[in-house]
Image (spheres, helix red, strand yellow):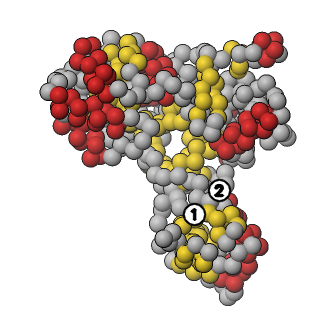
Amino acid sequence: MNALTPAPHAIDPLALRDPAVREAALMAALPAQVRAAQAVPALAAALAGIDAASITSREALARVPVTHKQQLFERQQAARAAGEADPFGGYSAIGWRAAGLARGLRRARRVYQSPGPIYEPEGEAADYWRTARAMQAAGFEAGDLVHNSFSYHLTPGAWIMESGALALGCTVFPGGTGQTEQQLQAMQHLRPDAYAGTPSFLRILLEKAAELGVALPHLKKALVSGEAFPPSLRDWLAERGVAGYQTYGTADVGVIAYETSARQGLVVDEGVLVEIVRPGTGDPLPDGEVGEVVVTVFTPDYPMLRFGTGDLSAMLPGPCPTGRSNRRIKGWMGRADQTAKVRGMFVHPAQVAEVLKRHPELGRGRLVVAGEMAADTLTLRVEATTRPAGLADAVALSVRDLTKLRADIELVEPGSLPNDGKVIEDARSYR
């Protein structure tokens, strides 16, 4: 699913497929990906008893456990403490040590370190991180020179961008981070057509260029990521002749979705399957509901099956006006990990979700932690479709049973709570 034939101003034909054809292809690819995940030690236990051949629908996939980044960290940390040789904690089918290769592991091209530390491998497939489509949507084309200002140090950001640029037939200048004036000098001399990096550093470069009286008329397009890209900054860049587009991804699974000229959400990449689930659970939510972005990638090298990104978003209705027919997400809307410590006890979104499951009359819920530190108050606000006698008391008992904490229960009308994915709201004063 990584193949992309460079074609100036064209759209990858895979992105134009009939949605039913795409969905059938994704479902047909799922069993092989489940088997690949079952073959790596870290996922074998979690997936034991699951018949890979039966995972051919989104409903079946929803029965597979979600894997979160914290689990990657904990497994890798435990492996190091035990003196194990596998730096990836048993999640990877690729590596570089002779013993592993002799056992059938495929060779990794690179290995990266993200904060934690967490180590991630890169396989040998062309455009391994699936960046080319995002660049194509941003107007990049064969023959462009791309000034890449993501870090080439430890983390995969720069290599994620570089792989896509090379797949499109672009040439890359490895600018990296910092050294603003030196990078600006290179841009003046080399006249790059495009920029890849964070939007804030692009602004710094353009502001420094204006300060020094350096003209950059050749720089016309940018693909940005790694931080928020508000419309105000997009418009600021456009006023200076640069059309900026954003892409969304992670160091674990690569590019997930990307912006197009329609500026209406982010189109999901062809090489991934995206679900929006209720935070703290693996339960898929209807389109339009805000929840955690969960991603399945179709590579056997690092078989992330239902990887929970920890990010919040929502599915948008309908296809992209550019003709790209895949599903669209609204974009980054915050973090799903809303764990709070209350009176010495950790309260997790999964516990709130379990309270709601125990009472079929309840819809959306939000646990509000208020007061001051050491004098916390808990209020569970829940939408109730019906209100039988004793419902609030029963819900309060469920909260106490699951969290060991007392909470006031406030029953509200359906649709009255914000659709922002927030399950736990920490409204305490920290003065």
Residue 104 as seen in the image, left or right of residue 318: right
What residue sits 54% from the left and 36% below the top? 250
Query: Which residue is tagged 1?
Result: 423
Disc 1 marks which amino acid? Val
Which residue corresponds to mark 2?
280
Left or right: 231 with respect to 167?
A: left
Which residue is located at x 56 percent, y 53 percent?
336
At x 69%, y 79%, the residue is 406
Q: Nearer the viewer, residue 376 or 162?
A: 376
Image position of 260 (left or right of 428): left
Q: Could you say which is closer to the camera, residue 99 or residue 297?
A: 99
**In the depicted structure, whether residue 59 falls above or below residue 104:** below
Decide: is 67 above or below 400.
Answer: above
**Where residue 171 appears, x then y in whole percent?**
38, 12
Helix, strand or loop at disc 2? Answer: loop
Between 78 and 23, the one nearer to me in the picture: 78
Q: How many marks?
A: 2
